[in-house]
Image (cartoon, grey):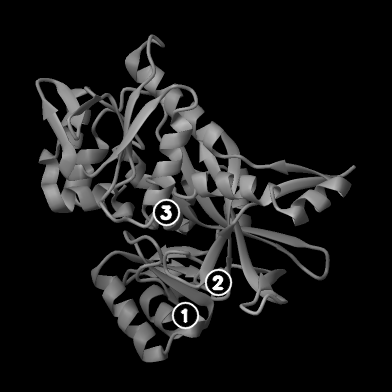
Amino acid sequence: RSQLFLDALEEELVMLPTGYKTNIPTARLDRFFTRHADGTNTLHFIEFNGESPAGMAYNDVMAELFLELPLMQRFAERYTVETLAVRPHAVDALLRIYYQWRGNRDKLSDLVIVDWAGVPTMTEFKLFVEYFARPGITATICTPEEMELRGGQMYAAGRPVDFVYKRVLATELVQRFGLDHPIIEGVRANVICMANPFNCKLLHKKASFAVVSDERNAHLFSTAEQDAIRQHIPWTRILEERKSVGPDGKEIDLAPWAAANKEQLVFKPNEEYGGKGVLIGWETAQDEWERAIAHGLREPSIVQTRATIAYEDFPRMQNDGTVEISRRLVDCDPFLFHGEGVGGCLTRLSTVTLLNVTAGGGSVVPAFLFFFK
């Protein structure tokens, strides 16, 4: 666990009880699936989003809108088209942990979605509120400042609630409020059910893939698991002044080697999200890269080898109404529920290597399954 670099406040948070059995009810794996000219395929997972995975509602609503387009309706005359809806799986996952926490199914949850005011995902929260209403779940959206614990009851902007769908990141919450925020006190007192739980922070850290990939931890995995790790997770290491086994299996002096091999590496801060602080080595000047490596030795950071990236041709509507076909980088990121199954995916297209819509240069599109009729 020390390899994940949790701070003292995070260490206390991850020890809080959840009231249910699942460690991570909802998650998303960022991946690249590439088909090569020689007929082979590669599947690389590069990050695990275990704390507040975004994009579920966007996928569903865009799929519904696409199916209404005349072009898709013509396409459906020839093919059977199926959507990959995510929200049904999400609602099932949240209700499952709520009923475990409550100990019965006597009522639906009184739910609140919590995040900072003005976050770009606010529209997704509204789409979730609308969807929660379908099975009769009353949901509202509040900021952390509007939460209050009073008399053993949690209130969201004055409304009693017993389920917190926490989209605000735990690190940001404790940085601003410490351990005295009502949500943390409510979890500690077991007066609310919360998703995702604070212990999801263990896998959400970028260092989690370094823990899996590092030769120091190989004894924790079976032979089959080690083979799967080598095949599907790029070589990943926490930046440290130590010897390690490099991507080619030879011993390296980790920090100097990372500084000298930017062409095959990506640099990522352990804690950031939304593409913040990420450097694509082969697109970064050497002096900037070396400064990042030096910083990464002071603040927990990882380096990860370059994953094989998928590119496909996609149509793009120009301002003059004409259609242009151009290459786009593609990732298709599955949503995981209870660590047991996959339900839908987030599909992103980008013209730049850092494929993150928040960071700019990318867009989210729906994904479908289709079959010949």
Please tell me whether mark 3 sits on a helix, a strand or a loop.
helix
The residue identified by callout 2 is: 306
The residue identified by callout 3 is: 211
In this image, 370 relative to 68: left or right?
right
Q: Nearer the viewer, residue 93 or 235?
A: 93
Task: Confirm whether residue 309 shows in the render.
Answer: no
The residue identified by callout 1 is: 281
- Residue drawn at x 42%, y 78% as measured from the top left: 258
Closer to the observer: label 3 or label 1? 1
Mark sitting on residue 57: none
Q: CA distance from mark 3 to mark 2?
A: 18 Å
Q: CA distance from mark 3 to mark 1?
A: 22 Å
What amino acid type is highlighted by mark number 2?
Arg
Compared with 126, 120 (above or below) is below
Compared with 309, 26 (above or below) is above
Crowding at label 2, few (<14), some or many (≥20) Cα neighbours within 10 Å?
some
Crowding at label 3, few (<14), some or many (≥20) Cα neighbours within 10 Å?
many
